[in-house]
Image: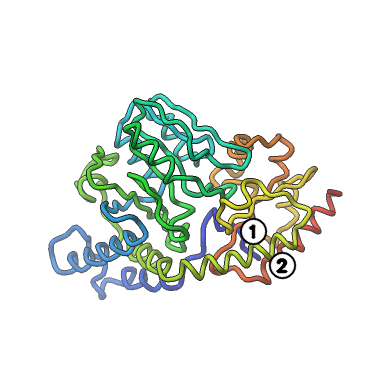
Amino acid sequence: MIYLDYQATTPLAPEAREAMLPWLAGPEAMRFANPHSAHVPGRAARAAVELAREQVAALLPPGGRVVFTSGASEAINLAIHGLGVKRIALSPIEHAAVIDTARASGAMLDWLPVGADGLVPADAPVVAGTGLVALMQVNNEIGTVQPVAEVTARARTAGALVLCDAVQGAGKLAAPDADLIALSAHKLCGPKGIGALWVRDGVVLAPLIHGGGQEGGLRAGTLSPALCAGFGAAAELCTKLMKDDAQHVDQLWETACALLPDWQLNGSATQRWRGNLSLRRDGLDAARLLSECRGLAISAGSACASGSGRPSHVLQAIGLTGPQAKGSIRLGFGRYTTRREVEDACAMLNAAAAAQGV
């Protein structure tokens, strides 16, 4: 099986696994303690949590704090519901976690424009009275990198805060300029079940989960030292390998594009993370192609919407027709993908498309 679905989830880094194992040992190791307890084992567990917090914070801007959550979806819910603003501006290509949470908040929604290239204009208007602007760093379906810094500047002029879903960019690109940043461990080779919300100093949130006062009163619940340690180790590895990872991904991108000349790219060819290759082919039935390429793990879009039967809201927003959206696939590769895997995958895809007569 060739795995090319890095936008859905990434392989667990061996270093992250090793960091987690001591905290999964048996009772004799005394590593099972609650990190919120005051005794010696509890303090040891807390030390592991705080080390992980520092490692994750190294991926993010100075002047803020890392709040651990169960994942990016919870982080986004904490940010939006925790602010409780009356008006939110957001792009129509945000992840469903942002769009659905914004709708559920009861706030008035203003939709930022998006072009056929999958980019929100850097001069997108932010009207007075807007409390929050939500703009992702890297789109999870088509890989476009949004002008977060420019939009943030306009938002601040209008008196708004900025939430950035950095799930696909964290550990790969420099941290975005925002007031709230959501990220997820399993999208940067860490474990599933943990994420974080970075909160700029001075930003006040109401808690989403009540009950114990943990995480500075913002998120009640006992933290898992194992998950925190894995997240931290994965984040630290990203800080060390960011340049090398990007060079490796660039090489894989060039290889794939050369071997898939009859496919069309979705989104900007330049303003994007090259580990996401969103392609379409006229007349292609992507669902059938995925079924036929059983040795290949790829996606036709967001894993969160897989099997829903709904057309991709991202592909619709950038102007693709229904047939074009149905003929689109997404290849995702990263640190552990080999050139040979990409070459073999491209051969499979071309053969499957040819079998459909397209």
In this picture, is 64 found above or below 38?
above
Residue at position x 60%, y 39% in the image: 308
Residue with the mark numbered 2: 343
Quadrant of the rendering where the N terminus is positioned: bottom right
Name which residue type carries label 2: Glu
| SS at badge 1 | strand
Residue at position x 13%, y 65% in the image: 39
**Left or right for 337, reference 186:** right
Name which residue type carries label 1: Ala
Nearer to me, 224 or 277: 277
> Where residue 283 appears, x then y in whole percent?
80, 43
Residue at position x 63%, y 54% in the image: 277
Marking on residue 297 = 1
Marking on residue 225 = none
Nearer to me, 271 or 354: 271
**Left or right for 338, reference 202:** right
User: Badge 2, how many Cα within 10 Å: few under 14, some, many 20+?
Assistant: some
- Name the front one of labels 2 and 1: 2
- Outermost residue, right side: 357
Nearer to me, 8 or 147: 147
| N-terminal label among 2 and 1 | 1
The image quarter containing residue 88 is top left
The image quarter containing residue 54 is bottom left
In this picture, is 343 found above or below 86?
below
Residue at position x 64%, y 56% in the image: 331
> Where residue 289 appears, x then y in whole percent?
74, 51
The answer to whether the residues at label 2 and label 1 have Cβ atoms under 8 Å apart is: no
| SS at badge 2 | helix
> Where residue 4 appears, x then y in whole percent?
62, 60
Whole-angstrom CA distance, mark 2 to mark 1, is: 14 Å
User: Badge 1, how many Cα within 10 Å: few under 14, some, many 20+?
Assistant: some
Label tally: 2
